[in-house]
Amino acid sequence: MRASVPSSARASAAPPRLVVAAPSSGSGKTTVATGLMAALAARGLAVSPHKVGPDYIDPGYHSLATGRVGRNLDAYLCGPDLIGPLFLHGARGCDIAVVEGVMGLYDGAAGQEELASTAQVAKLLRAPVVLVVDASSQSRSVAALVHGFVTWDPEVRIGGVILNKVASDRHEALLRDALESSGVPVLGVVRRAPRVGTPSRHLGLVPVAERRDGAVEAVAAMAAQVAAGCDLEALVALAHRAGDLSCAEWDAAAALVPSPPPPRPLPEGPAVVAVAGGAAFSFSYAEHAELLAAAGAEVVVFDPLRDEELPQGTRGVVVGGGFPEVYATELSANEPLRKAVAELALSGAPVAAECAGLLYLCRELDGLPMCGVLDATARMTERLTLGYRDAVAVSDSVLARAGTRMRGHEFHRSVVEPGAGDAPAWGVRAPAPRVEGFVRRGVHASYLHTHWAAEPGVARRFVERCRTS
């Protein structure tokens, strides 16, 4: 089921915008996109940061660069119709928007053509694309590569190229000469330099929440590289050539409107929903908290590494993704909070957990005691499980009625045994049919990351359960 914007909503003015893409992963688009955001912000522009796909980590660096919430644009999880509205929601009041792509420009959901690709998002946003090319092992061939990307899909407007990892003045001259006849302007040249201090883990950067000072320094270094090597005026001018958008801005309260009234009167006043944060649980979409608040919750963030009790008045808990294995010792040592979470779950209060949250609710993680809410154990492995998932709710839960269809994303190096409870959370069709996750009383725990903007009723249902449990 795909959510839609109410027809009564008015179209909103869209700011100038660019999509930063690349021929493949590892070309340097994160460095260029984040550096460009920071360099433009340093010039006094209000920059709206966005990331194509389900990535939780890059938006953290985008937030450091711009001082605004980094937001995701995922056409698989949310559906193509929500890309424009969610973009406008995030970009409200901004002077310019920079959208970082995912993987290669034309890479999307496996076997589903352009769905969820950077190219699709660029077309939906009517935004020009800046192609970041790793030029480290080529000279004249760069023209053939750029020509191929420009002509592959005429609806994708590649407005310029930024050459990355250029070795010398001579190398730059060869590259520029090769591209001169292509008709694609060179908007920047970033020289080969020692790697910016951005350590990686599991195909992505280490989250900002785990290395705040180092991340600030890394973003500053990216900004300096881009400011020194790129034509910022030309990039801003290109952003102003983005097309108009006719869609309406997404709004959390409006998204919750087309729904039946609750079956019985609810108590007055907000329900406190405690959302896990901090270094161990830094993965969340901003729209989730916005939907919870619009549904009547008071959203309060707590840190399972530091806080020994849940926020006062907690009626429900949301524990999202992250890297709990890195902090397993500290999480286990915080016995008072583990017991508080277990007692709340035992009372029947709603608890929603995704991926890292699932591990936290297990009896143990790599032999260390966790919350014990689920009769399951978790352990880390070398095998990476990664990919989009088409799912259907198997059991009625605090998030969804049985039969509700949602799309999710799975990304982990852990195994939970058993993989599903007597009442599973989801039935997943691919890559092989299976059930996974746990539903028991008020608990919904699963490996799947979902985007609630695609199914706003998830947030409404959760808050109603908080207020009536």
Image (cartoon, rainbow, N blue to C red):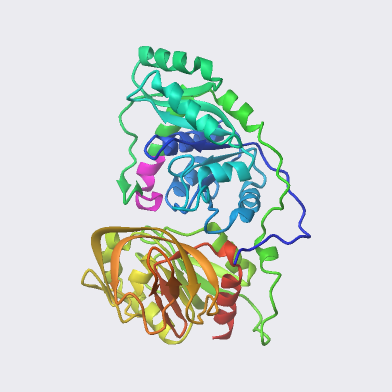
- The residue positioned 47% from the left and 48% from the top of the image is 108
36 or 431: which is nearer to us?
Answer: 431
Q: Quadrant of residue 291?
A: bottom right
Residue 378: x, y in percent?
Answer: 27, 71
Q: Assess whether residue 70 is covered by the magenta stretch.
A: no
Residue pictured at 48% horizontal, 81% vertical: 395
Q: Residue furthest left?
A: 367
436 and 188: which one is in front? 436
Q: Nearer the viewer, residue 67 or 428?
A: 428
Q: Is residue 47 left or right of residue 225?
A: right
At 49% from the left and 51% from the top, the residue drawn is: 53
Secondary structure predominantly adopted by residues drawn in magenta: helix
Q: Is residue 245 above or below residue 280?
A: above
**Magenta highlight range:** 206-217
130 over 307 or under it: above or below: above
Q: Quadrant of residue 461?
A: bottom right
Image quarter in which the C terminus is found: bottom right
Please name the residue shown 61% across and 72% down the image. 457
